[in-house]
Amino acid sequence: MNETTGQNPDDGAVRVRRLFRYLKRYWFWLALAPAAMLLETAMDLMQPALMSDIVDVGVRELRPEIVRATGWRMLLCACLGALGGMACTYVSSRAATGFGNDLRKALFARVQRFSFAQTDRFTAGSLTTRLTNDVMTMQFVVVMLTRMLLRSPFLLVGSVVLVLRTDWRLALPLVLSAPLLAWIVVHWMRRMMPLFAQGQKRTDELSSEMQEALEGVRVVKAFAVEPRMEERFAARNGALAETGLRSGLLGATLGPALQLVQQVALAAIVMIAAREASAGLVKVGQIAAIVNYATQVMMSLVMLSFQSMHISRAMISARRLAEVVGTEPEIRDGPRAAPPPDAAVEWRGVSFSYPGAAGDPVLRGIDLRVAPGEHVAIVGGTGSGKTTLLSLVPRFYDATAGAVLVGGVDVRDYGLGALRGAMGIVLQNPRLFTGTIAENVRWGRADASDEDVRRALRVAQAEAFVDAFPDGPATSVAQGGTTLSGGQRQRLAIARALLRRPAVLLLDDATSALDGATERALRAALRAEMAGTTVLTVAQRVDSIRDADRIVVLDGGAVAGVGTHAELLASCATYREIVDSQSTDPRDDALAEAGKEVR
């Protein structure tokens, strides 16, 4: 079982083959590449034979016209070979680039459909390296397969055939050395494959470490723990370097071993050729051609061995990409394409546990119904399941048991676009994107007019601070919204959610960074402007939810009470504890009064 995807790897080869379906669009270019490469190889194979004619006929027989004519033929062959090489490189690069582009888009689209749990299992760092480094590796291997990997065997076979045609005895060293060269390459690949896989894994870890450090740079600086982060990064970087060193040391043995076999075989050929030349069985020009062909054979074998290294690395990348392509999204579209008929939200016997989590369920036996247009607040202690309860409504996760309904329909029956399109969602940590303020708000509805954006900013109590910027809504926002305060980011996220005029508005602790006056103004504006919208609010502060139509109290993943603020104070001990924990100490009140008297 694969630790990342949770899938059985038996069908891994099938998933790897699925990657190459993205090459189908480029079959024309892939077909042209071998043809152009064959032209280049044929021209290369002709050069030693032409040189042999120059030596044995033109020079030995003192026939300058043969030298000139053959020289022009060699020049023509060189030009045609260069043309074929350039054409092969162009068409193979075009196919590889298109393949990489399509594969990267398909992978990104697949990742976008992953559930939160699946994204967490892969990790953002790993997915980043897969969509960049691994795809680039696959692009490179496509170029290599359509050019070098075909060129080397053809050059090898052509050279051996031409040597055999000249003198079969001279081909013996080549034939005898081939099994030894093959054994060296296979043995080397078996040892390198695990190192390549380990290197990719450690690259993922280093990428995740860097991403975490950059995203949390403000916390790092606030606690002055830069040396600690440098130590953590150095540990990851050192592990990657150690794997690279082991790969490099092992790789350093391949070239010399192959070259040793090559030089021994070449020396044997020269010795045999010298003996046959002294007996008059072979001419000097033929010996030069044979040595040239033997060199091409050996270089082809060396190139094949090094290409095997890239293929080994590409096999690891292909498996990693196939894991993404072969992982079906856990949260899938239902058959219902129409949006919810109304804004009622209901939990029926809902229980939930996070995938792979041990211990008790996060939610247990939740039965709750929220009427259309009702404003309901959800409170509870840390870890009571507030955010989880809200996350089940847009299907960020699916209930382990029971059902969540919107508009009287199980959310699993909706298409995700239809379900989430009817909702406005503000998460605990609102995320803004690189662009302008207006562009960030328009994530809620791309075709919104400037007036619609203004209205959403006004309701979210963001219009005043936005207009204070010199460029107003056209003000640029840094990645993640780091140039804005926490309260400003929250209000822009709320405006983004309001812009789509949602039937259901989900606010997950979305006003925690706002001051009391701004929060009260926001709640009043929501009441006035969003009539008919069902509002579900997760909150920590009791003061922010006193005016809710109902308050749901969670305790240990179960509903401990439901009612208005006054009703819960009278009937729910858990709610009273929450209220008491946030109440001002009477001694503080007394001190405040004493201070007033003094003043």
Image (cartoon, rainbow, N blue to C red):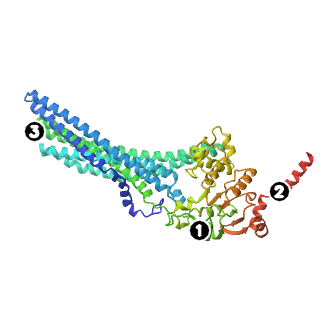
Between the C-alphas of marks 3 and 1, the distance is 90 Å
User: In this rendering, is residue 382 above or below 25?
Assistant: below
Q: Residues within 10 Å of mark 2 (few under 14, many from 20)?
A: few
Instruction: State the SS at label 1.
Output: strand
Total labels: the figure holds: 3
Which residue does the numbered mark 1 point to in the structure image?
405
First reached walking from the N terminus: tag 2 or tag 1? 1
First reached walking from the N terminus: tag 2 or tag 3? 3
Which residue does the numbered mark 3 point to in the structure image?
282
- Quadrant the C terminus occupies: top right
Which residue does the numbered mark 2 point to in the structure image?
585
Instruction: State the SS at label 2.
Output: loop
Give the mark toward the camera: 2 or 1: 1
| Identity, as a three-letter code, of the amino acid under mark 3 | Val
**Residue 267 at x, y = what percent?**
20, 40
Residue nearest the observer in this picture, 85 or 105: 105
Residue 365's label in the rendered image is none
- In which image quadrant can residue 81 be found? top left
Instruction: State the SS at label 3.
Output: loop
First reached walking from the N terminus: tag 3 or tag 1? 3
Q: Is residue 337 left or right of residue 304?
A: right
Q: Residue at x 70, y 56 (%)?
A: 528
Q: Residues within 10 Å of mark 3 (few under 14, many from 20)?
A: some
Between the C-alphas of marks 2 and 3, the distance is 109 Å
Q: Residues within 10 Å of mark 1 (few under 14, many from 20)?
A: many
Residue 270 visible to an observer of this rendering? no
